[in-house]
Structures are given as C-alpha cells and as structure tokens.
Amino acid sequence: MTMFQSAMDLITKGGIIMVPILLCSVIAVAIIIERLVYFNKRKENPEALYKSVQEALRKKNTAKALELCRRSHGPVARVLEAGVHNHNAPKWQLEETLSMVGQEEMESMERNIKGLEVIAAISPLMGLLGTVIGMVQAFNQVAEYKGQVNPSLLAGGIWEALLTTAAGLAVAIPVLVMMHFFDKRIERLGFAMERFAHYFVHSVEQNRNAAASSKTLVAS
C-alpha cells in the first residue's frame, strides 16, 4: 500500500500531463500483452511442416497435406495451405495467391505495432511538455515575488516539473525495446513465408516437369 501511495503521490505532483502519459502506459502494456499472446499462439516448425506437406503431396494425399497445415497456426502454414489448395493452378496464379496470403499474414502480424510506435514517439514529448509547463509555473512564482523566493521552494517546483520527463522516458524506453523485438519477429516470419513459398512453387514446377517428361517417354 505504501508503494502504491508513493506512486500516486508522484503522479499527482507531476501535474495534469501525467494523466495522458499514464494512459499511454496502460495502452502500451495492453498492446504488448496482446502481441505476445498472438505470436506465442503462432509458433511453428516450418521446416518440419514443409517436409511433411511435400511428402503428403508426393503421395497425392492432398487431404492430409491440408490437415497438416490446419493443425499449425503459424503464418508459414497459412501460406502452404493456400499453396496446397492451388497446386494445380498455373505458376503465375500460384505465385500471386501465395503472395496475397503472405501480405495478409504480414498485416495481421503488424496489427497494433503502429500504436506502439506512436506511444514511443509522443510519451517523451508529453513528458517534456509537462516539464516546460512546470518550469514556467516555477519561474512565474519567482517573477511574482520579484526574486524573493525560498530556493528550496523553487527547487521543489523544478523537481516536480521534471517528473513528467522521467515518466515519459520510463514509458517510451521499454515500448521501444518491445517494438524492435516485434519488428525482428515479424521480419523473421516474413522471410520464412517468402522462402517456403518459393520452395513450394519450385517443387510444384519440378513435379510438373517430371510428370511431363514421363508422359513424353511413355508416348515415344
């Protein structure tokens, strides 16, 4: 309870600007938790999944290949599922379909990340604004009393004004760290989707060429 009261005292002393900074921190925590849960649910082993799907397709078991993709909730699985559905389509159509699914997955992964960017950008600015307002009020007292102000009173006013800058930075720094963590995760998953989509298209083309060659040999 004492720690809670101390925190509330600091927020009160920081002034009205502490309210939006506190609101930003609550929103940021909510976004971070939501994104952590999102990415945790979409863990997958794309290499193992791709090998299993290819094995099922070699046996012409499309239903099993689709079932393998649906068991995984990762973005690579969604791309491979679209590929299995359209593996008989022309190459250009297959590539276009996989590209569209990949873009949809990227949009899903990037959801709410912009919110973290905004919070990381405006939190220090709001803290600086609160400090400037506090400094103006502190020195306004000096002007009113024509410089006859107790130095300890002035220092106390400045100390309270600086609280908002500290609060803004305290919100922005961890948000920036988490934002870069999510960006790296999205970049890695995006590369994986692109790589396995390319592998899938290449595999389908190889199978078609092999089938065409077999037919030619049989006909001759």
Image (cartoon, grey):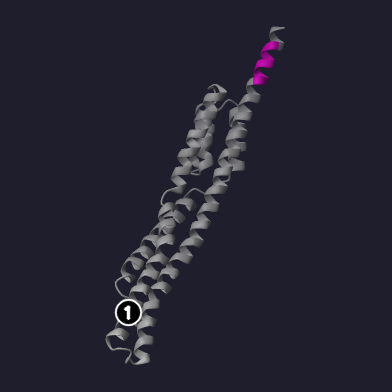
Location of residue 218 with respect to 37 vertically, above or below? above
Q: Looking at the picture, tell me which residue is in the foreground, 52 or 41.
A: 41
Amino acid at the residue labelled 1: Lys
Location of residue 206 with respect to 143 vertically, above or below? above
- Quadrant (top left/top right/bottom left/bottom right) for the C terminus: top right
Residue 130: in sight, yes or no? yes
Residue 84: in sight, yes or no? no
Magenta range? 209-216
Location of residue 188 with respect to 97 vertically, above or below? below
What residue did someone put label 1 on? Answer: 13
Relative side of 92 to 141, left or right: right
Q: Position of residue 83 (x, y in %)?
A: 53, 31
- Quadrant (top left/top right/bottom left/bottom right) for the N terminus: bottom left
Q: Secondary structure at mark 1?
A: helix
- Predominant SS along the magenta part: helix
Q: Position of residue 125 (x, y in %)?
A: 40, 65
Q: Position of residue 52 (x, y in %)?
A: 60, 36
Q: Looking at the picture, tell me which residue is in the foreground, 109 or 126.
A: 126
- The verdict on residue 212 being magenta is yes
Q: Quadrant of residue 48?
A: top right
Q: Residues within 10 Å of mark 1 (few under 14, many from 20)?
A: some
